Image (spheres, rainbow, N blue to C red):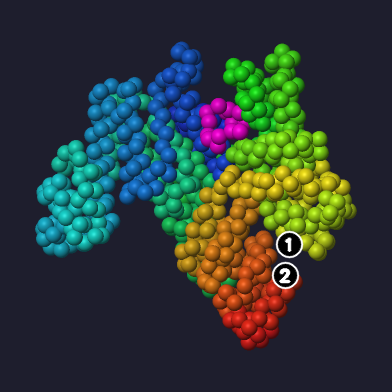
Amino acid sequence: MWPDNETADDLFGFQVHADLVRAVVLNPKMQPVTVGVFGDWGGGKTSIMRMLERDLSPENWEKGSLEAIQCQNTAVVYINTWQFEGYDDAKAAILSSVLLQLHENKRFSAKVRTRALKLLKGINAMRLVRLSFKYGVLPAAAAAVTGGAAAIPAAVIAAMGLKQFFATVAQDGEQTSEGPSADDVSDIWKGLPQDEAIDVRTFRKEFAALLKDATIDTLVVLIDDLDRCSPERIVENLEAVKLFLSVDGMAFVIGADRRIVEHAIRSRYARPASDERDDARRLVAREAEDRLVRDYLEKLVQVPYAIPPLSAAEIETYMTLLFCGVHLEKEDARTCVTAARAARKANRYAAFGYGAVKETLSGSVPVPLAARLSLAVAASPLMADGLKGNPRQVKRFLNALMLRLELARVAGLEGTIKTDKLVKLMILEYVEPDLFLELFNRIDPDGHVVLLGALETHGKKGKSKPEDAPKDLLPGWTSAWAMRWVAMQPALAETDLRDYFWVSRDRLASTFSGITMVPPIVRTVIADFATGIAPKRNQAVKAAGNLAADERSAMYRLLEQDVAARPSELKAYEPLRALAEGGIEGAVAIFARVLSSHAAAEMPGTVGMWAIALRDSKPGYREILAPVIERLRGTDTMVGRAIASAKT
């Protein structure tokens, strides 16, 4: 079993990405620069960040080496922005974090570290000014001087004295319960000299001088976990980055899911295209909105870099090295990692598998390790396709697989369960749990699933169109991903699947519940739906259309759980209705299933009207919704009476 942590040890060949980014940020002709390391949840962004943090520090290279010389006048700062999520001013938090890490860095002289501390105090003063206006607290003394003006000039604040000014702010905040408390202000003010506040222009000038005094040619700031923040915090963090972009020698590396960053920018700055009622004007507005988001991001991120998914060969190498770490002594495992790195440089398309390990260990491979390396060969092609080459999902999936193989061993099923077939079934369970459950429910007494035979026969005939697929099955089977899954080798129609389902369902029904997490992009979509605001809802529908199959499944599971928790509330059904109305793949089938699986007496009447409107809105929806509507029509309930009263 393996922990789900990022690492600077390169087990999946991402060092090449870190090396590329390092070359960009150390190029003086590119500075100041921002590099966007974009990738999905679990795609390896943080591991690349940790590699960069290690490789940009001169002390981590052999003294006198080319790399050490390149990094001699380089400083690196790592910031996890998610840690500032609850901070009152995320922009000031990033600036403060950069200065604090410079102040604490023993490489620099006392003069430089003192200068960093002075700037840090100035940032704290800026934060207090921002707090006072954020909460609309105008101190009485300052208001009197300005004649009750809605803004307080800096000169007035200076004349009054910052310490007294903010003491008044705190007092007013306590009285109104709208602003920072006295304790908040006291904590921020602690150790801050009077009148230490600094404006943005002065900050840039002072910060540039600080870098010069410290003989720092390049300061690299690694901004990680940006996509775990709320949209408001994401934009604030991006604005903080912009403050530095006119300072020579600055380089930022931002790790995030690009979709979430774009979503945050759209939330903050774009006018929702749905505000336009005319279709043509709505299209123009949507294009303008997309252009605004694209232009904002392009101005901020000069070098976008998308992390590619792992290939089958890279997944086999990754699995091989993970298994080596478990079954070999630490020194031998490290030798294999080093050998894999050399083999990757010689041929980046080949896997580092059993033969390479055997050669590295001079022909002696422990039997347990040999068995696991055979598993890596069989499983890697299926995992590359089913798990989208995502390192985190590969590791989590592998942990679950090891549990089930161990269960098969202790239950005496080793001889009957084939690893490649178990992997194929588990991939379906991981990505499309509802389809996996349907197979489980359709299993014959002899262990076969007739549905699989029909699906595999359909695939062999070369009929790739969804409408040509067998009809007696869940609509999800007609998705492109499900069709690819059916076509994966090995075929399962002729296999007795009883033992496979036994290890997957009977004893370990919750195996995946502890290892699957909701991707941040899905949380963002759900959060937008939860606001109940039309523009946010429309934004969520648009984002849902760009989700991958497994992300969409996770979203639907959460929405179904919400309906199950509050079946009598109309708001619980609204996201599914909006998704179906927007034509999002699978949404109408999930909407129909929700209406079928809950008691009609619990449903609001409006849900029935929504079902009728959806039934008539798009080709193919009638076939899915008509049976559900007719069942509800025959009930003596609010939803039944609503449907019966409609002109259909």
- The answer to whether 555 appears left or right of 460 in the picture is left
Amino acid type of disc 2? Ile
In the foreground, 373 or 144: 373
Mark with earlier residue (2, 1)? 1
Up-down: is 606 above or below 584? Answer: below
Is the residue marked by circle 1 packed among few (<14), some (14-19), or many (20+) residues within 10 Å? some
Q: Is 9 inside the magenta-drawn segment?
A: yes
The CA distance from mark 2 to mark 1 is 9 Å
Q: How many marks?
A: 2
| Residue at (74% x, 14% y) in the render | 363
In the picture, residue 190 is in which quadrant? Answer: top left
Secondary structure beneath disc 1?
Answer: helix
Q: Which residue is mark 2?
A: 624
Name above or below for residue 607 compared with residue 47: below
Q: Residue 263 at what x, y percent from top left?
A: 50, 54
Dot 2 alpha-carbon crowd within 10 angstroms: few under 14, some 14 to 19, many 20 or more: some
Which residue matches tag 1? Answer: 475
Residue at image position (72%, 13%) is 362
Q: Residue at x 84, y 46 (%)?
A: 495
Q: Tell me, yes or no, whether the two marked residues, 2 and 1, touch with CB atoms within 8 Å.
A: yes
In the picture, the disc for residue 569 is: none
Give the x, y percent position of residue 235. Answer: 42, 50
Nearest the viewer among 536 and 565 is 565
Question: Residues in magenta?
Answer: 1-15
638 lies left or right of 352: left
Residue type pointed to by label 1: Pro
Where in the figure is residue 436, as x and y percent of width and height?
72, 53
| Lateral position of residue 102 relative to residue 429, left or right | left
